[in-house]
Image (tube, helix red, strand yellow):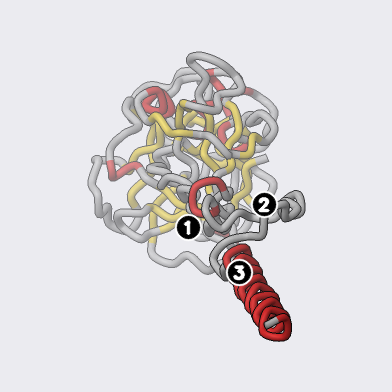
Amino acid sequence: MADNTMIIVAVIAVLICICSSISGGAAFYMTQATPEASPAGSPPPPAGSPSSSSSSSSSPSPSPSPSPSTSTPPSVVNAKPGEAISCTGYNPKGEGAIYRYDGDRKMRHYPTADIAGSWDPNWGSGGQRKIDCTGFTLGGDVALNPGSSYNSFKHKSGKCVHPNGGSSNPNNGTTLVFWDGCDPDYTKYKFTSGGSIQHKTSNKCLHPSGGSSNPPNGTPLVFWDGCDQDNLKFERLSNGAIKHVSSGRCIHPRGGSSTPDNGTELILHDGCNEDRLTFTFV
């Protein structure tokens, strides 16, 4: 009997150990971290590490790449070189200033009306020709056009062109003649902006006698009021000859001498290449 009791106690002890092992294993299994959950007491992620749950909302957006330049190209300049303009935007000379446009977004200021008029008889229209001058280059002020000043009308022979009779205010129809002496004011002339030849002291211009646009050979030149007609336009050629534009004839000494006498008239005639046709304005 005693032996049986000992056997029963031993079996019970073994069963208790087995149950304790099974219970402890289950408890151990239940406390293991699942792959989805962090173990209790895990250290926080390093500073600056993005959080997987907030990366879409808290991460700064990447900076956009620089866009190619889309600056507006310079505006078209609605003016031709030589024309008068006024400026908006950049206007260094102030309200009312008129500039000469030199092309390539360059300009110069007309400091006086006389200077402006010596280059452009219509310079006043620049007040209505308003240009955005932003980005323009301003050059030095415009000087008086040297071609606008009155000079002696001198022939290759050394004689100058005089009013026949030597008057400072010759009457309409007075002829022009060669004569010694180039200093008096009444021997001074200039080309106007329109191409006419104007006498300094009378303001009369050189006309073909009779007023024709196609005067025949031998037509004398005379002083007459008016400087705007097409039949009064003359052109200086590279050889020094002076051509009447509408007829194509040039100014000659009557008789064709290279050394005309005092009193020889100036006439229009075919031919523009002879040395005796050379004139200078000095």
* Residue at left offset 49%, top offset 42%: 82
- Counting from the top left corner in percent of width and height, residue 274 is at 55, 67
What residue is pinned by disc 2? 157
Question: Which quarter of the image is occupied by the C terminus?
Answer: top right
Q: Nearer the viewer, residue 81 or 216?
A: 81
The kind of residue tagged 2 is Ser
- Quick one: label 1, few (<14), some, or many (20+) residues within 10 Å? few
Alpha carbons under labels 2 and 3: distance apart? 141 Å
Q: Is residue 119 left or right of residue 247?
A: right
- Counting from the top left corner in percent of width and height, residue 257 is at 56, 59
* Residue at left offset 60%, top offset 33%: 108
State the mark number for residue 103: none
What residue is pinned by disc 3? 23
The kind of residue tagged 1 is Gly
Indicate whether 14 appears above or below 57: below
Q: Which of the two discs, 2 and 1, sits closer to the camera?
A: 2
Indicate whether 10 appears above or below 169: below
Q: Earlier in the sequence, mark 3 or mark 1?
A: 3
Is residue 146 in view from this perspective?
yes
